[in-house]
Amino acid sequence: MKRIYFFLCLFLLVATLRLQAQRASDREAQADSILSLMTLEEKIGQLNMLTGNWEATGPVLNDRNKADKLKNGEIGSMLNVKGSIHTREMQTLALGSRLGIPLLFGQDVIHGYKTIFPIPLALAASFDAEVMALAARVSAREAAVSGIHWVFSPMLDVSRDPRWGRVMEGPGEDPYLASVMAASMTRSYQHPFEDGLKVMACAKHFAAYGGAIGGRDYNTADLSLQTLHNIYLPPFRAAARHGIATFMCSFNEINGVPASANPYLYELLYKDWNYQGFVVSDWGSIREMVVHGYSKDRKQAAEQSVHAGLTIDMESNCYAEYLPELVTEGKVAESIIDRAVRQVLLQKIDLKLFEDPFRYCNEDRENNELLSAANRSAARSVAARSIILLKNENALLPVKDTPRTVAVIGPLADSRRDMDGNWVMLSNDPIAVTLLEAVRSNYPHSRIVFEKGCDITGEDCSGFDQATAAAREADLVLLALGEAWDMSGEARSKGDISLPGVQQQLATEIYKANPRTITLLMGGRPMIFEEIAREAPAILYTWWLGTEAGNAIMDVVRGEVNPSARVPMSFPRHLGQIPVYYNHKNTGRPPQESPGNYSGRYIDISHKPRYPFGYGLSYTRFHYSDITVSTQAGNLRVTLKLENTGEEDGSELVQVYLQKLWGETTRPVRELKQFRQVYLARGEEQTFHLDIPYSDLAYYGNNGWMDGSGEYKIYLGRNANDMIYEQQLHIP
Ligand code: NOJ
């Protein structure tokens, strides 16, 4: 019987492999046959991506030039064309070209399409791959039913500088957390839906964009190969391993060579990582190589990018304009163009666009699915899981009773547009639930008083008196402070990331008026708010939470959801500490607290972050015990017992850090290598293990890739600065 079963399995395996090989060769044959019909101009058209300029100028149809280009097959893909109706219009034009090759529609779906999810940095704060996956899944579906084939996400730029405006779009400071996010979002975005629709994801920005000097957007990244490989590249590698369909290059130069044509990066991608997808430039980044001072002119820029391996030119027009003559002059071999075009055609085949170019355009489906109750409920649960409890004196939170009078105060308490944060594409029509609305619906029988108190920016304190009067009379104060939605995002770097305007002064007055004040801090980056950190009784860091912001905040305030999110990027106390990050090196003279020594401290400010990486509180308590560490074949195993000893059900983030004690290259004082959110009902306990594969210890050192064997300390931490357990061990 066993034998029959074995042969049956073997037969099925062989049959499946054959079928897969057959399909692979079918799609390749199809791509080759299309390619063989194409003129050089038509090929180059496939490498040209233009914007529909939807936001700025309305449909492309008004742009004769672009419409003609579509009809001539001079455009292979577009961005900023959204919705079934408009994508259908553009697709119809493209299908009228000689070969009728369908267009790809790409879009910045960064944290949702119509139903907006928390900003990616907040998703990272959830430290939960399932939460990230849920956000990606709903976003992919809403995009797909709106005619979009390609989402320009996940943004995987690790960054250690909260001044950089784009930290809101990314995974924070840690390469391991970023890699988990890369894997989870890639899989979730790209997995086909039941009706066969699927989207391509895009790992961006390749690479080291987050290393912009001084946190100034687009700035140069000047870094060692060790930093490049150990800090910035791991999430991109994870995305490639999980089959991400596309990459987008970054704007910046790396060690003198712009990423749009950096041979080191592309060799790594295509050769070392054996990447099979394609790479799109960032907006105009090919032509910007001239401004960088790398290319002599736009023609040379086109030559350099295509040779490096950059497949699609987004909005530079350099490929369209110069590749024909570069081929004629023999400077670019047509085979290089063919290879790039083939990569694009293969994706179009995989999306089944040749079978039905309009399969993503169905208005009824779009109307039914966007912003559905199910999508909103997903956004609400994801948002609640992204809120960090930073402080909770005297267990002020959760608020279990119903207050008679609630004062809702602050410039962000009723600010709908801000709740979505930056990078929302249908932002003309903000629909997010504000805090004030959610307070009203949560406490229908209470008296609710709203006072703005002050604006986000500016010096005007004239609203303070009314705000403090309202606070004095209330049983509960909810104080919503922070940045405006457009103070973070692309080209939104800040030299001062302190809470803007007079908001800290307002907070101080409110705390004096009523200590039953819960402070909600909203923004796209870790901000600096020292007075509030010291004086506030309770702080929730809510980021920008999207469509269900107000409801999710109230879920956490009332204890329907016990906060489980953690700090994904160290919060500085002072601007002068930046960059402050947990996985730094020890140096020969590590900083000491006490003055008067020759240590690597500041003499005027602390060297420690206000809130370290991995930090966050809960409404309950967790006890760790029975911790053992064993070395197994191929991995390191940490076994532990975790008990919820508090009064509430909740999740604990178990964090495992490693430190390689010595070796051919120094290594960081700690590196997160494994984590898990463990949910336990109150009183419940669980024994479980976490495994760290030895392959995850490999690092890029002074002599290239090292396997990571050697002497280590392993830690279990409540956060990167608070260790529960440590043990020294040898990894063979
Ligand atoms: C520039 C941004 O850097 C990139 O993230 C985005 O995808 C493109 N513009 C397209 O909008």
Image: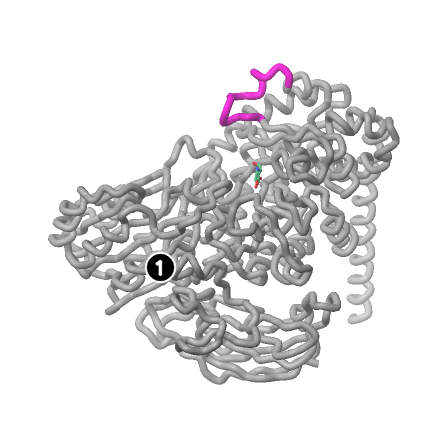
Tell me the magenta residue range. Answer: 52-65
Q: Quadrant of residue 706?
A: bottom right
- Please report the residue visible at 54 percent of the width from the left and 47 percent of the height from the top: 137
Image vertical order of residue 142 relative to residue 632, above or below: above
Badge 1: residue crowd in 10 Å (few <14, some 14–19, many ≥20)? many
Cβ of mark 1 under 8 A from ligand 1? no
Q: Position of residue 460 (x, y in %)?
A: 23, 41
The image quadrant in which ligand 1 is located: top right
Image vertical order of residue 459 relative to residue 566, above or below: above
Q: Position of residue 561 (x, y in %)?
A: 35, 59
**How was this image coloured?**
one colour
Q: Position of residue 433 (x, y in %)?
A: 33, 42
Q: Magenta stretch: residue 59 in it?
A: yes
**Quadrant location of the N terminus?**
bottom right
- Please report the residue visible at 48 percent of the width from the left and 35 percent of the height from the top: 425
Image vertical order of residue 220 relative to residue 237, above or below: above
Q: Is residue 559 visible?
A: no
SS at badge 1: loop
**Identity of the amino acid at label 1?**
Val
Q: Is residue 467 visible?
A: yes
- Please report the residue visible at 41 percent of the width from the left and 63 percent of the height from the top: 564
**Quadrant location of the C terminus?**
bottom right
Q: How many numbered badges does the structure rendering display?
A: 1
Q: Position of residue 332 (x, y in %)?
A: 84, 34
**Residue that badge 1 annotates:** 561
Image vertical order of residue 201 relative to residue 46, above or below: below
* Secondary structure mostly seen in the magenta stretch: helix
Seen from the viewer's position, the closer of residues 103 and 514 is: 514
- Please report the residue visible at 62 percent of the width from the left and 45 percent of the height from the top: 252
Q: Magenta stretch: residue 7 in it?
A: no
